[in-house]
Amino acid sequence: MKYSILRNRWLDPSLLRLLEGQTTARRCASLCLRLSDCVAFVVDRENSLCYGTSFIPTQETAMTSTGDTGFYVMLCRLPDRCRLENGYIYHVTTDTCFQLHTKYSVKYVRADGECAEVGEQMLKLDTEVKDEMIRTFLQAVGKIVDLHIQGTRVESHWFYDSGDKFKFFNWASQSNDNQQHHIIMSYSDGWLWRGVSQLQAAGFICELKPL
């Protein structure tokens, strides 16, 4: 199989959904192709069930299945530049190709620099749909570190790297955002946002810049 890198890997079950009762691999592929937000599927061969997902798994986020009851098959909706072997995770509905950096904690300026060094940007959460997608993913994969995202406060306003003002926020209660300079997605707050100082260390999320 061309995408054998995906064999025998499972994402957390909360990222999967049953496509349609009992089925075969061929029917599973047909069902997934008809759904605009399905980019990969799992066949549970033991129970002849088919599950679809909007996320493409990577080495860091995927878990080896117990036994040999299923496998992922990638469909043709993955941008060429969003390559699994480079550690990317892809979500089709928001067309987001991103990477988690959770093995060490750094200040915002270093996180921003590390993203830029490889032609990426800090994750830009500018819609409720994209924010919810990331929160769902983080809850499923069980990361337990706070994560920097794109955003800088200048006087009383928040700006993206592009210079555009924020129009969407998802603050945790009592986040005290007006006293801080940058934003983290807070693990202890269910991945809602908190304002932090320039000295705050955290993991971070990079994404490929839109074409």
Image (tube, grey):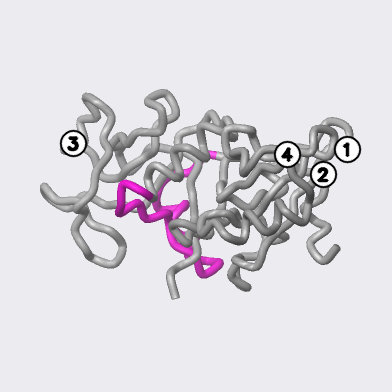
Quadrant (top left, top right, bottom left, bottom right) of the C terminus: bottom left
Residue range in magenta is: 105-129
Is the Cβ of the residue at disc 2 closer than 8 Å to that at disc 1?
yes
- Alpha-carbon span between mark 4 and mark 1: 18 Å
- Outermost residue on the left side: it is 156
The secondary structure type at the circle numbered 2 is loop
Residue type at mark 2? Answer: Asn
Chain-order first, disc 4 or disc 1: 4
Residue 65 part of the magenta segment: no
Picture residue at 79% right of the left edge, 38% below the top: 48
Picture residue at 66% right of the left edge, 53% below the top: 40
Q: Nearer the viewer, mark 1 or mark 3?
A: 1
- Alpha-carbon span between mark 2 and mark 4: 20 Å
Chain-order first, disc 3 or disc 2: 2
Residue 90 position within the rendered picture, expressed as x and y whole percent measured from the top left: 57, 56
Is the Cβ of the residue at disc 4 closer than 8 Å to that at disc 3?
no
Q: Nearer the viewer, mark 4 or mark 3?
A: 4
Residue type at mark 1? Answer: Asp
- Alpha-carbon span between mark 1 and mark 3: 52 Å
Within-10-Å neighbours for mark 1: few <14, some 14–19, many 20+: few
The secondary structure type at the circle numbered 1 is loop
The dot on residue 8 is 2
The dot on residue 179 is 3
Q: Nearer the viewer, residue 5 or 120?
A: 5
Vertically, is 6 above or below 195? below
The dot on residue 68 is 1
Residue 114 seen = no
Within-10-Å neighbours for mark 3: few <14, some 14–19, many 20+: few
